[in-house]
């Protein structure tokens, strides 16, 4: 039985980094005997240009039929002035909701080879390895009512922040399970001193804690959490939080590692099916120039192998290959500092070459 992967390159640097991911998949197939089938379709601005919608029906059907989805990035200035429901971002929000991908895992790992790339002092970030678990299909992103109403000059814009107990419980379980597989410390981030929805969040998380006696549960207000992330980030193991707080804190955590160009993410449903994407966006300013770092999408692929395809040994091989390539000093522009930079495809090819060497040793 072969694994079916839906590849949605999207916009901006999406297509060029995805080319490297496909090279790596081909190598895993040839050199390691990994049985995989790839099918491609459009999302975001690319979907808009072809079908007039950011999430074409064919794309959704492909994603639903696949074992896992690998996504590049969506968005760009070309589509920025469209009405909200036609923005490329709606493709991403739509596929998350349609596939029920409620649990978004965003690791922030500092590769020892890149300690200098962080804007924080090396001793504050050396060895950093934290995981943000962001609720992804609820909260203020999807709450109703929402809209802009009234006469020009007197209009009101409004959104609704709402969480049900069952939504909080399922993201809570997801986070506790992950904490059990890591350092067994979970920090739930809320604004329970002001917002009722997150008062309930805190109550449900606390009650869930009784089912996980081995996990040390703590709570933190989001403003303090933002401060602690840049003050002493290594105090965290796993953070669980709402959709919007997770959006903000995960960008902050990403930058602790020096380059958002290195970070993968997974969005999972109840059954462990998932969509995997780099945390960086479509970076339209550097698109098409071979400057993008393909390592985030390659590490996203490694997460896919581990979390959705039951191929942990291949994930280990891929992550090891990335480590060796970094050890060898190869850097794309985003992590090169003052040093010399290689192109997107040179980086991708170096990972493939290293994987082939590793395959000979298996
Ligand atoms: C993210 C992005 C998206 C989000 C946007 C592009 C809709 O910022 O994945 O973090 O807010 O979820
Ligand atoms: Mg974001």
Image (spheres, rainbow, N blue to C red):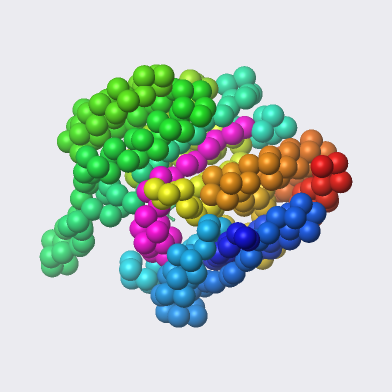
Q: Which residue is located at x 29 percent, y 37 percent?
A: 169
Q: Which residue is located at x 63 percent, y 61 percent?
A: 2
Q: Is residue 164 above or below residue 257?
A: below
Q: Which residue is located at x 51 percent, y 23 percent?
A: 183
Q: Residue furthest front?
A: 1
Could you tell me residue 27's position as x and y percent? Answer: 76, 57
Which one is in front, 191 or 36? 36
Please tell me whether residue 258 belongs to the stretch shown in magenta: no
Which one is in front, 250 or 302? 302
Quadrant including the N terminus? bottom right
Q: Is residue 97 left or right of residue 198?
A: right
- Find residue 175 and report its image quarter: top left
Could you tell me residue 264's position as x and y percent? Answer: 57, 46
Magenta extent: 88-110
How many marks are shown on the rendered structure? 0
Which one is in front, 186 or 39? 39
Please tell me whether residue 95 belongs to the stretch shown in magenta: yes
Q: Residue furthest bottom?
A: 51
**Can residue 350 be seen?**
no
- Find residue 193 and report its image quarter: top left
């Amino acid at each position: 039985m072969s694994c079916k992967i839906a590849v949605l390159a999207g916009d901006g640097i999406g297509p060029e980094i995805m080319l490297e991911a496909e090279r790596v998949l081909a190598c895993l197939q040839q050199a390691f005997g990994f049985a995989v089938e790839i099918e491609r379709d459009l999302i975001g601005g690319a979907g808009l240009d072809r079908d007039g919608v950011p999430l074409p029906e064919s794309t959704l059907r492909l994603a639903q039929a696949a074992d896992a989805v690998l996504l590049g990035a969506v968005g760009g200035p070309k589509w920025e002035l469209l009405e909200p429901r036609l923005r490329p971002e709606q493709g991403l929000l739509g596929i998350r909701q349609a596939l029920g991908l409620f649990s978004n895992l965003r690791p922030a790992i500092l590769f020892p080879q890149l300690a200098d790339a962080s804007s924080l002092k090396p001793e504050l970030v050396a060895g950093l390895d934290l995981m943000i678990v962001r609720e992804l299909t609820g909260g203020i992103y999807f709450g109703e009512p929402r809209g802009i109403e009234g006469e020009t000059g007197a209009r009101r814009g409004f959104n609704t922040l709402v969480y049900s107990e069952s939504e909080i419980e399922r993201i809570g379980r997801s986070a506790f399970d992950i904490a059990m597989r890591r350092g067994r410390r979970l920090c739930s981030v809320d604004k329970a001193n002001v917002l009722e929805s997150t008062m309930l969040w805190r109550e449900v998380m606390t009650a869930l804690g009784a089912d996980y006696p081995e996990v040390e549960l703590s709570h933190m207000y989001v403003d303090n959490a933002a401060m602690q992330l840049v003050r002493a980030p290594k105090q965290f193991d796993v953070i669980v939080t709402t959709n919007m707080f997770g959006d903000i804190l995960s960008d902050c955590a990403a930058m602790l590692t020096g380059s958002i160009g290195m970070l993968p993410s997974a969005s999972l449903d109840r059954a462990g099916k998932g969509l995997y994407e780099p945390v960086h966006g479509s970076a339209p300013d550097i698109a098409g120039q071979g400057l993008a770092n393909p390592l985030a999408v390659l590490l996203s692929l490694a997460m896919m192998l581990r979390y959705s395809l039951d191929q942990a040994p291949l994930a280990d091989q891929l992550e090891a290959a990335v480590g060796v390539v970094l050890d060898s000093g190869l850097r794309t522009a985003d992590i090169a500092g003052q040093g010399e930079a290689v192109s997107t495809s040179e980086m991708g090819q170096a990972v493939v070459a290293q994987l082939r060497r590793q395959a000979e040793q298996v």
